[in-house]
Image: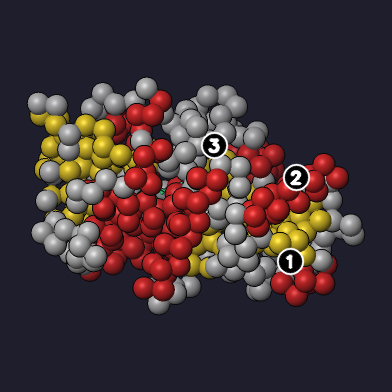
Amino acid sequence: MRILVIGAGIVGAALADRLARPADGGRAGPGDAVTVVEELRPGAGTSGTSYAWFNANDPADSAYHRFRTDALRTWRDLAAGLGDPSWYRPAGNIAWTADEDEKAELAARVDGLARLGYAARLIGGDRLRELEPAVRVPDGALIAHFPDEGFVHGGLAAQALAQRAAESGARLVTGRRAVGLNVDGGRVTGARLDDGRDLDADLTICAAGRHAPALLATAGIVLPLVDPSKPGSAAPCLVATTTPVSGVLNGLIHAPELSARPAEHGGLVLEAYDIDAGIDDAIPADRVEAAGADLLARARTLIPGLSADIAGVRRCVRPLPVDGYPLVGPQLPGLYTVVTHSGITLAPHLAELVAQEVHGSPAEALTPYRPDRHT
Ligand SMILES: Cc1cc2nc3c(=O)[nH]c(=O)nc-3n(C[C@H](O)[C@H](O)[C@H](O)COP(=O)(O)OP(=O)(O)OC[C@H]3O[C@@H](n4cnc5c(N)ncnc54)[C@H](O)[C@@H]3O)c2cc1C
């Protein structure tokens, strides 16, 4: 089968890697020819700027929680198969709060997760100091530890998976945009590139992340993603990175006003939900800069004596389905879509399940996430 994957973020790269690798458990198609087309380079889209926390940290929807814990297992297996690369960091996550209402919420979350068999526990200040010696929290704070969570460096992960796909025989076409899907008699037959070339395929997989709605619209398909240009949409956000600082954090920290983790080049990645809430398409450069300064001030409260400065602040857009859940499945004959938020957590697991479906065995685990569930 000729398979065309459009987009080489973490989703498209994991898919290409899975589809291009030789038969495994009877699922992969040894006769498949996989082509990946990527407008920029692997991992250069949202995956490269993501906060990239892999987790199943919400017990509220137990089925989705289970799906995500399966995804964490798939990540462990994938990373082990790659020799536990340094871009995969199962270094744990710590969350804390000093607010009384939020303490009750955090305790309930830990309890709900522990009841589901997930590694979640409350810890004291002594344990926090062992895990994250540089971090200071106020006396009386409630502190939770989730030891099986972690993060990936999303750009490096996508690059590594795309490279392994190429080594397995996939053809990578980079620096080219698919400007439209080709449709013949109701069947998608591939895509047209911005240089006028047509890439023909028996199956085209749209893994274009936040750009998927524009691409799918060329075949008359409406994908229910949050429109980032709408005021108050939760899709746009800001992520700051700092200059290098050695060893100040080991894993992820979720403080009340700051999320932080180690960055790829030795600094920190910083994000804050309340700052994200004020971001929109038209945010001027001076406000982006001010948000960076605000994030750095928060980081210096969390980590007293932090000597780093802001290295950059990037405005990015989450590929956010309107109900928050993945959008995965066939849409027209010859066309399959895989678009999701939490793509860092879910990509390798989705790749396994999609490979199974592509080769003729429906994956029941994907049933709740079909793109047409809204119609
Ligand atoms: C600030 C932020 C924080 C996040 N935090 C987390 C988190 O903690 N945990 C988590 O699991 N997820 C998180 N996410 C979500 C996660 O990053 C995304 O779900 C994931 O990166 C999406 O991957 P993707 O491969 O679908 O998209 P992308 O990485 O955007 O890849 C799509 C690729 O397709 C290419 N492309 C698009 N259109 C075309 C076209 N027409 N032709 C050719 N190429 C095309 C793009 O260049 C891009 O490289 C976060 C996202 C953001 C923005």
Name the N-terminal-most of marks 1 and 2: 2
Quarter-wise, where is residue 177 in the image? top left
Give the percent coordinates (x, y) of residue 26: 20, 62
Task: Give above or below for 248 relative to 333.
Answer: below
Q: Nearer the viewer, residue 237 or 141?
A: 141
Element marked by disc 1: loop
**To which residue does mark 1 refer?**
307
Q: How many marks?
A: 3
Give the percent coordinates (x, y) of residue 369: 40, 38
Q: Residue at x 60, y 59 (%)?
A: 118
Q: Residues within 10 Å of mark 1 (few under 14, many from 20)?
A: few
Q: Residue at x 36, y 39 (%)?
A: 367
Q: Amino acid at mark 3?
A: Pro
**To which residue does mark 3 refer?**
236
Q: Amino acid at mark 2?
A: Glu
Separation of marks 3 and 1 at Cα, in angstroms: 29 Å
Q: Residue at x 28, y 61 (%)?
A: 17
Q: Quadrant of the C terminus?
A: top left
Say if mark 3 contacts mark 1, CB within 8 Å.
no
Task: Give above or below for 137 relative to 37.
Answer: below
Give me the disc on residue 105: 2
Q: Amino acid at mark 1?
A: Ser
Q: Residues within 10 Å of mark 2 (few under 14, many from 20)?
A: few
